[in-house]
Image: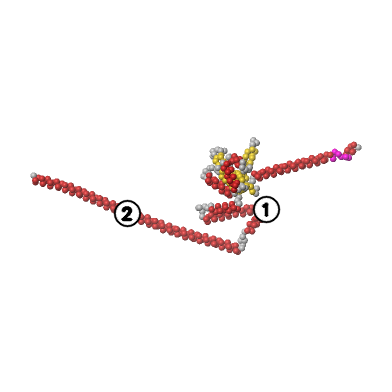
Amino acid sequence: QGPSSFIATGRPPTLQKPIMVETKKDDKKAEKKDEKKEAEDEEKKEAEKKILKRDVVVHPIVLLSVVDHYSRVAKGTTKRVVGTLLGEVDDFKLHITNAFAVPFEEDPRDPQVWFLDHNFHEQMFSMFKKVNQKERVVGWYTTGPKIKPSDIAIHELYRRYCPEPVMIVMDVLPKEEGLPMEAYYSIQEETADQVFKRTFMHVESTVGASEPEEVGVEHLLRDIKNASASTLAVRVGDKISALKALTVRLKDISVYLNAVVAGKLPLNKEIIYQLQEIFNLLPDQDSEELVRSFAMETNDMMLALYLGGMLRSTVALHNLINNKIKNKKLKDQKGDDAKKAKEEKKDGDKKDDKDDDKSKDKDKDKAKVKKDDKEAVRGGGGSAGAGTCKDS
């Protein structure tokens, strides 16, 4: 009965099964917890990376301030200038809206020897804060044009005023087309000897502007003119640059649409809607009114160009004729002057000859007078001797 009752009850299998199920559940819970922790850690790391890799948007007034600082202090030299950047975070982007110069000196022989007047920086920031409370210190700029060994130490100095400052390296004399600036954050890098060292990490940077800033920049660009180029040449150059930019945009649109049709890129409805709006804004080229208006406008422009060309040619011919008349008058005057000079020379020569003749005549007269005087003296002496003989 013992064994049969033991088998009938079936306690051993009933005792072992719950233990196995509980251990599996515990393992699954532990795995889920580990996965959650790993996911949380990854999210934290990604958030830190996003904070570190926050895109930088530089406003036009900052570019103008940096160029003005360089032109006043270090233009024509190998020195660089340093200043403070002010801004705020908006739409998960760091907007650099203002900047001011800071006195800075460094030894060209030893780059580790440098001086930055942080007292001046603090005073200037306090004054800027009175004007705009939203702006805060977000970093600093330098006209490198590349990163130098002392930049890490300067960056650590700015960490006193901002936990994660950004460094903008500005190239005030760019040789290539594109944005003349690079943005960097500093991060900790673990070396082989277990010592953490700061190094720079590059982040994306763009130039952005609000509506008032765009208006101001447009007015400034209008005032900037090339003295050697005419207004028509400037307008034609602007039209050519605009057409080149339009062709680049059209190529990008065609590449995107071909990639969507081929299935290489997913369909983005917002982009398609914007393209449809662009096409809707295009004029109807088949309408007679549009063709007539374009023809009239081109005819008017061509007429103005034709009249301008005729006027320029007539003015040029008029100036050419006047120039020839002036040259002829100058030649005649030169010939008259030469003739007068020759006549004056001849008159002078004649006068000199006459003076010579007169001087010769005078000399002859003087010589004759002297001879006569001598003869008179001789004759007077002889008559006096004869008289004395008679008296005796």
> Is residue 182 depicted above or below 287 in this figure?
above
Amino acid beneath label 1: Asn
Label 1, secondary structure: give it: loop
The answer to whether residue 384 shows anywhere in this view is: yes
Which residue has dot 1 on it? Answer: 268
**Mark 2 packing: few (<14 Cα in 10 Å), some, or many (20+)?**
few
The number of numbered discs placed on residues in the rendered structure image is 2
The verdict on residue 9 being magenta is yes
Q: Residue 248 appears at what percent x and percent y?
A: 60, 53
Q: Residue 61 appears at what percent x and percent y?
A: 58, 49
> 2 or 182: nearer the eye?
182
**Is residue 36 shown left or right of residue 72?**
right
**Do the residues bearing badges 2 and 1 touch, measured as CB atoms within 8 Å?**
no
First of labels 2, 1 by sequence position: 1
The verdict on residue 297 being magenta is no
**Mark 1 packing: few (<14 Cα in 10 Å), some, or many (20+)?**
few
Task: Name the residue rendered at 14%, 46% in the picture.
Answer: 381
Q: Residue 108 appears at what percent x and percent y?
A: 54, 39
The image quarter in which residue 23 lies: top right
Magenta-highlighted residues: 8-14
Direction front: furthest residue: 130
The image quarter in which residue 49 lies: top right
Q: Quadrant of the C terminus?
A: top left
Which residue has dot 2 on it? Answer: 344
> Is residue 12 depicted above or below 225 in this figure?
above
Amino acid beneath label 2: Glu
- Main SS type for the magenta part? helix
